[in-house]
Image (cartoon, grey):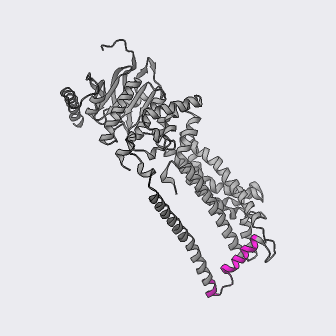
Amino acid sequence: MSDAAVQDILTIRGVTKRFSVGDGELEALAPVDLSIPTGEFVCMIGASGCGKSTLLRIVAGFEEPTTGNVAMYGKAITGPGSDRGMVFQDYALFPWMTVRENISFGPRQRQLPREEIAKTADEFVRMVGLERFADRYPNQLSGGMKQRVAIARVLANDASILLMDEPFGALDALTREQLQNELLQIWKRTGVTTIFVTHSVEEAVLLADRVLVMSAGPGRIESDFRIDLPRPRDVSSPEFNALRRDIARRLTSHLTLARA
Amino acid sequence: MSEHATTLPKAGLSDGTQRSLPGTATADRRKRQRRETLRAFVLGAGFPILLILIWDRAVAITGTRLIPSPYQVAVMMYDFTFGGIYDDAFSGTILTHIFKSMQRVYGGFVLAALIGIPLGMMIGRIKLLRQLLDPTISLLRPIPVTAWLPLSMIFFGLGPNAAIFLVFLGAFYPILLNTIFGVRSIDPRLFEAASMLGCSGTGMFRQIVLPASLPAIFSGLRIAHGFAWILIVVGEMTGVPTGLGSVVMDGRTLSRTDLVITGMIVIGACGFITDRIIVTISNRLLNWSPQHRE
């Protein structure tokens, strides 16, 4: 890697995961090794069942690896923690809390002074442009707005790694495009390390510094693409499409293997 | 509401249709709402009136002396409330009886809620506790509360405590089981989201488990509250001198069916009013969840 000065925020060493399914066992992840430098935007892409969500959940601390270890700045991850925040595809907002209460949930757990909590809440409500909806409940919001709240909820908690599990998968194309742009702006502004799981090659090439293509049976990282295109990226440029084609080709070759 | 408009808050298009209706439309909607409320009231009140008419005709046509006419019951109700007609032991005593019964109903009900909700939350969350208690609960639950009557009289003697105990037993299971169900059906993602945001231990119970299972807890409370009023008659069969249940039992002993029916109506009205109070509280607490509103 050219930028040796950047410290790795996350190191994954020999992580495997096996689930027991009925009488047998399912090998979800073959040994995975991966280092992610601070501030990088990484997309993981792969067919269903390639273990990308499992890997993300292990990093989040929701699942324990069967073998291997995950460390953040050299310190082993043993469970969920406020240094890593997950944005789920189905939002997982607290339905009985307003937008503002959802966003200030993390700061409230740390028992900060009331004014500081209010200030943080205001700041992140503004960051995702929901000032007018701050006192609404999640079920009064559209999908795109809910996902904005989920992102703000993680960032307001000062997470240094943003984990996103197909966050825009349930949104319509227009909203998705808008949220992709907003996410990039937020990422640029905050410098938060982001690991983003997606099904869409275009989304991966549009967003990421680095695209990890995963393959199934058992899940492993098949190839590691650097995307050096300047942002904002032009989805119709020849360079963009060349990368998209390359990645899609790797992906489909695994897909046919996985089907077999 | 258009999906696209709501996802573009900065464009200022979203929810405009909801908030800034022109005056005529608002007045129109209010009128429609009023008509709807009136309709609900007329239909809801009309049916009992019809029943009373049928009751009146049936008594007149059959000429029975065992069942009083609605008019006789109304007179009894007046005397029970204000006195001045029969001037017997029951005249003008309604408030005493209501007060006594309420003490027992709410004593048992509140006790059941205070034990049932926390216990249900713990059984729902802690596997060990579930394995320990679930078989016992399933075993005790089918036993009719009335079957506990002899034992409760041995435990608590003749008096109000036995009544409170019976009401407690009747209210406890619906509260407990609904709470367990509510906790068990919380989306596990919410626990993950809370724990990644730094929430754990008792904070999890207070901030996630309780509010997330509140809709189920409230349906449990409503069912339990109904049982509590049902059981008051049974509870007050244990030899207490006052209370609506004892009025009904006394009426039976004295063959005063008008008194029995009066007591029944008062019990029904009390249950109805307090049920409305619970629904109002639940609507307020659950205003985040439109599917639980009534």
| Residue B155, percent from left and from top | 74, 54
Residue B72 on the magenta segment: yes
* Residue A108 falls left or right of residue A86: right
Of helix, strand and loop, which mostly describes the magenta segment? Answer: helix
| Residue A156, percent from left and from top | 48, 30
Looking at the image, which residue sits at the far top? A5
B139, above or below A192, in the image:
below
* Residue A253 falls left or right of residue B97: left
Depth check: give the residue in front, B1 or A47.
Answer: B1
Q: What residue is shown at x 65% (from left), y 87% (from top)?
A: B63
Q: What residue is shown at x 48% (from left), y 44% (from top)?
A: A137
Depth check: give the residue in front, A79 or A126.
Answer: A126
B159, above or below B195, in the image:
below
Residue A16 falls in which quadrant of the image? top left
Residue A249 on the magenta segment: no
Residue A47 falls in which quadrant of the image? top left
| Residue B246, percent from left and from top | 74, 66
Q: What residue is shown at x 45% (from left), y 51% (from top)?
A: B20
Q: Is residue B174 something one can see in this rendering?
A: no
Instruction: Identify the magenta region.
Output: B58-81
| Residue A144, percent from left and from top | 38, 40
B167, above or below A166, in the image:
below
Looking at the image, which residue sits at the far front? B23
